[in-house]
Image (cartoon, rainbow, N blue to C red):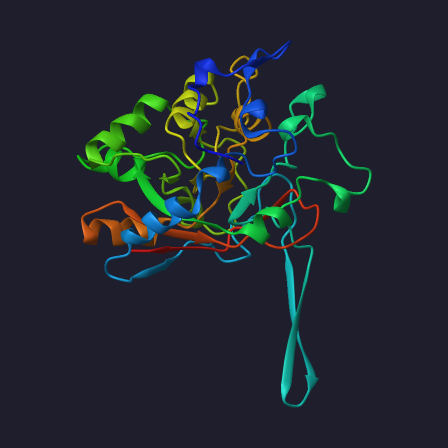
Amino acid sequence: MNLNKVVPSYDELPRLPKLDMPHSWAFFGPGDPFGTLNFLTPEVVAEAARSVRTGEVVALSLPADQPDPPLFGREPMRHQQFDIDRNTKDDVVDNYFPQGSSQWDGFYHVRAREFGYFGGVEAATDPVDAPLGIELWAERGIAGRGVLIDVEAFLTADGGPGVPVDQEHTISPGLLQRVVDAQGVRIRQGDILLIRTGWPAKYAARPAGAEAVTAIPGLHAGEDTARLLWNWHAAAVVTDLPAVEPVPGDASVGSLHRRLLPLLGLPLAELFALEALSAACARAGRFDFFFTAAPLNLRGASGSPGNALAIL
């Protein structure tokens, strides 16, 4: 699409009737499968490469069998290794959920009720025929300037409590803005925002045998969060949280997934491993880096393993 036109502000976007929520469908155009990934133009990606200064590479994926125990009723994956012959081994993975660990939520993941998925697309009878499958992101790749918004470091800097692991704790858009201001970062159009809360490390540190949690912290699901993220012109939002927004959530507030994925076309990522990145940014004294991810090329899929790196 042509991005020479001015991006409308959140409050200038048209609203869907009945839902009364803004959408970007007309801005990105009919049939567009990329949404705000369109902000990652060749010029933006080339400029983002200037964020590489030391060449330190930080992997951003949790182990494939984490979190453990799995969340949202999923069963553990099963990994078996076997001998093809005396010199060769092979592996098979069963019961694997592409969205069970570090993951991308694709545009075929959440719909806006009767209005459809992103762009008003309806569900396909066979998922491989879905015009919003994750393979479209895989074929273009995701690369650009990453910016760490280290909420956990900000909250604990003066000895205060951080984000809890098992409470429906809400991170307000005002807090996100305060963290950005404190870090001295200027958000640019096309930035990939990585929001750290420390959740996976806290979950893994619980006593052995502890059950999966049912209350989970997250970004406030209301319109002010969607407004901030859209007006920042972010290309994607990556978190270390299991659902981006609080679980089980508040029906009176609504769904941040619905506001961002099917309506604004803003890709989300969950359960990324951000502890090593936080330490690397602290050592470097800066919060920007080159970010790259290669979603799984699985036709029609609604999500994918994260497969992401940060290069400082």
- Could you say where residue 302 lies in the image, as x and y percent from the top left? 65, 42
On the picture, is 163 further left or further right than 217?
left
Quadrant that contains the N terminus: top right
Residue 206 in view: no
Q: Residue 39 or 123: which is nearer the viewer?
A: 39
Q: Residue 179 or 311: which is nearer the viewer?
A: 311
Residue beneath the point at 50% across and 55% down: 307
Q: Residue 34 or 90: which is nearer the viewer?
A: 34
Residue beneath the point at 20% across and 53% down: 284
Residue 123 in view: yes
Answer above or below: position of 140 versus 88: above
Residue beneath the point at 28% across and 52% down: 50
On the picture, is 49 further left or further right than 255?
left
- Could you say where residue 16 lies in the image, as x and y percent from the top left? 61, 14
On the picture, is 124 further left or further right than 183?
right
Residue beneath the point at 54% across and 41% down: 212
Answer above or below: position of 199 versus 120: below
Q: Residue 301 or 245: which is nearer the viewer?
A: 301
Quadrant that contains the C terminus: bottom left
